[in-house]
Amino acid sequence: MGYELTIEPLGQTIEIEDDQTILDAALRAGIYLPHACGHGLCATCKVKVVDGEVDFGEASPFALMDFEREEGKALACCARAQSDIVIEAEIEEDEDAQNLPVHDYHGTVVRIESLTPTIKGVFVRLDTPEGLRFQAGQYVNLHLPDNIGTRAFSLANIPTSANEIELNIRIVPGGSGTTYVHEKLKVGDRVHLSGPYGRFFVKKSAGLPSIFMAGGSGLSSPRSMIRDLLAEGSTLPITLIYGQRNRDELYYHDELMELANSHASFTYVPALSHEPEDSDWTGFRGYVHEAAKAHFGGDFRGHKAYLCGPPLMIEACISTLMQGRLFERDIHTEKFISAADAQQVRSPLFRTL
């Protein structure tokens, strides 16, 4: 048995199954509702139930307080319908969004590469010949066995090669999901994933030069976005500032150097923060935000910036960009965060983190 879910102010009605969350039903219908953690902790997906009954699910009492429940508020990532329902959500129109519906996919691991000592490249060939439709910059949820649950990973390939997807997965000490991928997942294994998710993609309608700032395995989304732009023949300036601790961790370096050599519009600035002083590294020594400030002379006006990497890197980059006269409307970051991240304090400088 299912129910009807009406989403205002769109006035659109869709089907919702008994055990399906409001968020999942909306995304699978190609309707984007703002969300982040997906664990009922960050309150990004808060909606108002104006008619009907819902089960609030495992929403944190800090993210959804008792008085809010009494007012009809709910977290879309946790709430399930118990009747036909009508909700009100803050939905922002984005002319660059393709609003692709979320689907389930199954596939086979065809290759696993050690990109760095801590990052694996996992390549999955999907069963569906047409592959996974997505916008460069989006991510998927990978379903892991042994009651591990799902983990979000950005798509590192470009959309035109979506029948075989690439995920760059850094091992997190103590993390059950990434430990499973690094230590147990093998070529030939069958996997289940869902997607695409996220609103992290190039704002092409702006017609502005792009600055990509990435650290660690956060390179995956920018790499997909940059390669997609170049494949489309974009002539607007594109700059990638990519940081790692040392040369061993700097993956896809040769590929990015070659892209920079073959495309006049693309500039690649690698930065190493902990490279030994006596090494032969001739590139920038320091952090991503420092390399960006040096490269642009501290003035970022007239650009769109796309940030992907560890929270501390994101914070430092946002501060540097704002000091260089680039402000919130032109700074874009990944929207998915882990359950642990959702409990951390967000920067007061940037409301969408």
Image (tube, rainbow, N blue to C red):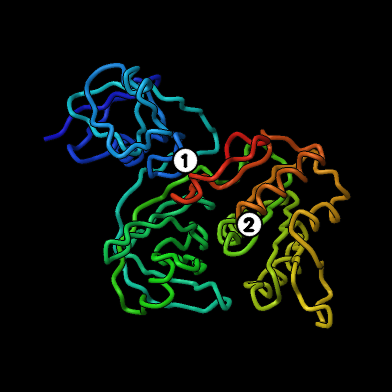
Mark 2 residue element: helix
Binning the other alpha carbons within 10 Å of mark 2 as few (below 14), some (14 to 19) or many (20 upward) gives many
Distance between the alpha carbons at the discs numbered 1 and 2: 18 Å
Residue visible at 58% across and 59% down in the picture:
218
Q: Is residue 63 left or right of residue 243?
A: left
Which is more N-terminal, label 2 or label 1?
1
Q: Is residue 63 left or right of residue 83?
A: right
Q: Which residue is mark 2?
A: 226
**Residue that sits furthest to the right in the current view:** 297
Residue 39 screen position, x and y as percent: 38, 44
**Residue 138 versus residue 92 in the image, above or below:** below
Residue visible at 15% across and 33% down in the picture:
2
Binning the other alpha carbons within 10 Å of mark 1 as few (below 14), some (14 to 19) or many (20 upward) gives few
Mark 1 residue element: loop
| Quadrant showing the C terminus | top right
Instruction: Give the number of the disc on residue 98.
Output: 1
Tell me which amino acid carries mark 2.
Ile
Q: Quadrant of residue 225?
A: bottom right
Residue toward you, 98 or 314:
314
Tell me which amino acid carries mark 1.
Gln
Residue visible at 59% across and 40% down in the picture:
346
Q: Quadrant of residue 41?
A: top left
Residue 317 screen position, x and y as percent: 72, 49
